[in-house]
């Protein structure tokens, strides 16, 4: 992956030398290495707790995110402890160097895991408009808006931080989670804006986050893929994303009906992904997109949406499921394309429903379908929450992160994504 075959660039060499052979149906239960934290600890935020609802685990009995009494901006308070009740779990992905968990500058509140590849990472924001669909989930109506984050390999850094979160989004998330102002400063440190794209043609990887989440909180995964030569297009889904800036600081918030719109949202998510597949020509400034090599991955409900899109769009050549399930017709009819599954720990799933559904799905997958078990990573540990929660000084208990260290979680997930897409795109 990376550059086109025969390329002699550093990006291309890195990807060519890191190929991993996945056997058909191979099951990998790999130890998740732990690294002792280095440097000073972040001070804990007194009384704050980012508490998720019980694991679903994947949009079943409980979703990835719930609103508080139908409202997004305020959460319940109980006793003397401030809680971020039932809102989005930040799945965090960290890097292989524990030192990277320490803020790089005195004024940075958080420090995301830096990408591991040779290319600087540029970031663009773009909102597409699907004129054939009316907006029924997000406030404001009109035609369906599809906000994108585009991580891409750059020839050199740009002149300003990229907007993984815009200023309006950062303020909104700090309010939603009842964090102090500027608590998320530094979240844009992995990318730059206006960076000239790297030469060559680059594979395209689509990203769909879980319910209530944003692709911006999969930055550790996406920026790493881009640093190794891929263009990653994160798709936020208005109405079920906590908050997304669709341009000019205009924030679309999650639908106050919460989980009641999941069925409608599932349909819109698939349509969003398919629309992006057919309108990649609208993506400018991120280099040459190789539309012959399109992959996709998603977390939780996003995994279900990407699998459904793959069923209808054979141009999506490979996909990865991060701790999600599947819907019909994929569940019964399977997929022809290579499809990897990363399955975490689900302590609340005493009836092993998750494993049974995955078993049914894997029986119908006709292409290579490696399964990797992340035995110490829980559902939210597949997002940036895994490194963000501890950096914010919040308790990790009850966050559905699992006992894995942020460093090991990020490194393991990055390796899986990078090697799988390197093999099959």
Image (tube, rainbow, N blue to C red):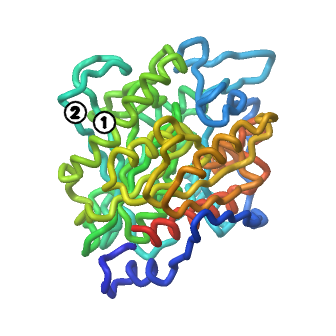
Indicate the secondary structure of the residue bearing disc 1. strand
Residue 4 is left or right of residue 12, and the answer is: left
- Residue 146: give its label: 1
Q: Give the mark nearest the N terminus, 2 or 1.
A: 2
Instruction: Find residue 106 and report its horizontal and vertical position in percent.
Output: 59, 55
CB contact under 8 Å: marks 2 and 1: yes
Instruction: Find residue 66 and report its horizontal and vertical position in percent.
Output: 59, 23
Q: Quadrant of the N terminus?
A: bottom left
Which quadrant holds residue 414?
bottom right
For discs 2 and 1, the disc positioned in front in the rendered view? 2
Q: Quadrant of the C terminus?
A: bottom left
Which quadrant holds residue 191?
bottom left
Instruction: Find residue 270 and report its horizontal and vertical position in percent.
Output: 38, 37
Q: Identify the residue at horizontal 26%, vertical 65% (top origin).
A: 290
Q: Nearer the viewer, residue 298 or 154?
A: 298
Residue 346 is left or right of residue 309, and the answer is: right
Indicate the secondary structure of the residue bearing disc 2. strand
- Residue 130: give its label: 2
Q: Nearer the viewer, residue 115 or 21?
A: 21
Query: Can residue 411 be seen at all in this image of the molecule?
Result: no
Instruction: Find residue 180 and report its horizontal and vertical position in percent.
Output: 59, 33
Q: Identify the residue at horizontal 70%, vertical 57% (top origin).
A: 373
Which quadrant holds residue 8?
bottom left
What whole-number distance in Å separates the C-alpha atoms at marks 2 and 1? 8 Å
């Amino acid at each position: 992956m990376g550059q086109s075959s025969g390329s002699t660039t550093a990006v291309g060499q890195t990807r060519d030398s890191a190929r991993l052979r996945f056997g058909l149906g191979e099951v990998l239960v790999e130890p998740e290495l732990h690294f002792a934290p280095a440097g000073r600890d972040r001070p804990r935020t007194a009384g704050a707790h980012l508490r998720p609802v019980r694991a679903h685990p994947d949009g079943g009995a409980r979703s990835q995110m719930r609103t508080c009494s139908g409202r997004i901006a305020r959460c319940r308070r109980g006793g003397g402890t401030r809680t971020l009740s039932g809102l989005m779990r930040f799945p965090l992905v960290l890097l292989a160097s524990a030192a990277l968990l320490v803020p790089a500058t005195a004024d940075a509140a958080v420090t995301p895991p830096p990408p591991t590849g040779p290319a600087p990472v540029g970031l663009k924001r773009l909102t597409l408009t699907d004129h054939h669909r009316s907006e029924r989930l997000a406030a404001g109506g009109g035609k369906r808006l599809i906000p994108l984050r585009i991580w891409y390999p750059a020839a050199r850094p740009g002149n300003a931080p990229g907007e993984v979160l815009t200023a309006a989004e950062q303020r909104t998330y700090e309010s939603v989670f009842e964090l102090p102002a500027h608590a998320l400063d530094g979240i844009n440190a992995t990318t730059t804006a206006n960076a000239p794209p790297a030469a060559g043609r680059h594979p395209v990887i689509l990203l769909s986050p879980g319910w209530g989440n944003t692709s911006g909180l999969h930055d550790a995964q996406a920026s790493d893929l881009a640093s190794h030569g891929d263009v990653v297009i994160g798709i936020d889904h208005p109405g079920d994303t906590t908050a997304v800036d669709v341009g000019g600081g205009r924030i679309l918030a999650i639908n106050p009906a919460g989980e009641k719109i999941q069925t409608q949202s599932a349909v819109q998510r698939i349509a969003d992904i398919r629309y992006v597949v057919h309108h990649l020509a609208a993506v400018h400034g991120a280099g040459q997109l190789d539309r012959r090599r399109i992959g996709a991955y998603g977390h939780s409900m996003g995994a279900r949406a990407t699998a459904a899109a793959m069923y209808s769009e054979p141009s999506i050549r490979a996909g990865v499921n991060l701790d999600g399930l599947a819907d019909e017709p994929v569940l019964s009819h399977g997929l022809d394309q290579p499809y990897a599954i990363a399955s975490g720990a689900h302590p609340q799933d005493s009836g092993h429903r998750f494993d049974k559904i995955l078993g049914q799905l894997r029986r119908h997958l006709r292409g290579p379908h490696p399964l990797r078990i992340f035995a110490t990573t829980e559902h939210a540990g597949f997002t940036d929450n895994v490194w963000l929660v501890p950096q914010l000084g919040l308790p990790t208990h009850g966050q559905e992160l699992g006992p894995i260290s942020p460093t090991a979680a990020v490194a393991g997930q990055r390796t899986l994504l990078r090697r799988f897409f390197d093999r099959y795109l």
